[in-house]
Amino acid sequence: MGKLRRVLPALLVIGVVAASGCVYWRLLKFKNQFADFHENFEFLSGARYSLIIKNPVLSGGDVDFAMKAAPSRADSLDGFCTGRVYDFVREEGSGPGGLLRYELRFSEDRFTEMRFPPEFSGLFPGDGLRALIASLGEAEVDRGERSLTARTREERIREVMPDRRRVVEILGSPTARWTGKDGRERIFYRYVLETPDSDGKPDRRKAFGRFHFEGEALRRVDASFAGHVFTFDIP
């Protein structure tokens, strides 16, 4: 009996690790789909941008695993979750952009669509945001640091990116701003996810957006949530 008591916990740990490994594999497969953007996705522009996932690989459980916190609201139909809403509220600063709402849609528990906050339509031209998203296909992933770095290859992307004035006009006054040793000005926004999740781990709900400018031109965007950092370089 004593041996059994030692073996069962070990098997449980192995099972959890194996399950987590499957989730990471599906997340990596999803990331790699961006390398063939037009085959796997459709980007809809208009009053509100939307990314349609043609060949879904992520389940609702995979999304929950990656987000690390319950959504602000979940929609159900016949006992199945058909959507998750994530409301990110700016912690400091003032003006517009105080709440950024992301909506994820599901079909048969497969992640099929992401709707971006309406503010993105004013912040990024459709071609600009699509190019940033498509660059995920060749992004470098550091699983240990839980980070992803992408670099868009579209030569004219600089011309359509928002300048410093536009970012502040759409997102409001930032939480902080400073100039780094490289001479680039940083504009920083801090957010927190509104969620009924009360597991005592507030760090899981924190998020930020950071914009790097060279003069007035945007050269880099960093975004973070649940310990994951996404970097988009604009050459």
Image: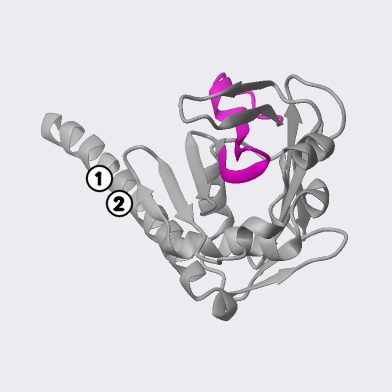
The circle drawn on residue 18 is 2
Number of dots carrying numbers: 2
Across and down, in percent, residue 120 comes to: 77, 50
Which quadrant of the rendered structure holds the N terminus? top left
Label 2 Cα neighbours within 10 Å, binned few <14 / some 14-19 / many ≥20: few
Q: Is residue 207 visible?
A: no
Query: Residue 197 location, x and y as percent?
Result: 65, 29
Q: Is residue 198 magenta?
A: yes
Looking at the picture, tell me which residue is in the foreground, 110 or 45. 45
In the picture provided, is 140 more to the left or to the right than 229? left
Does residue 89 show up? yes
- Residue 224 in the magenta stretch? The answer is no
Q: Are marks 2 and 1 in contact (CB under 8 Å)?
A: yes
- On screen, residue 82 above or below 224: below
**Residue at image location 77% in from the left, 40% down from the top:** 100
Residue at image point 84% right, 37% down: 169
**What residue sits 27% from the left and 40% below the top?**
13
Pinpoint residue 72: horizontal percent, then vertical percent. 74, 37
Amino acid marked by disc 1: Ile
Query: Going by the picture, which residue comes out furthest to the left?
Result: 3
Q: Which mark is residue 176?
A: none
| Kind of residue indicated by mark 2 | Ala
> Which dot marks residue 14?
1
User: Crowdedness of circle 1 by 10 Å Cα count: few (<14), some, many (20+)?
Assistant: few
* Residue range of the region highlighted in magenta in the rendering: 194-223
Percent from the top left, x then y, of residue 131?
60, 64
Quadrant in the picture for residue 163? top right
Give the SS element for disc 2.
helix
**Rounded to the nearest whole Å, what is the CA distance between mark 2 and mark 1?**
6 Å
- Residue 61 vertical placement versus 42 (above, below): above
Identify the residue at image location x=41%, y=59%.
Answer: 28
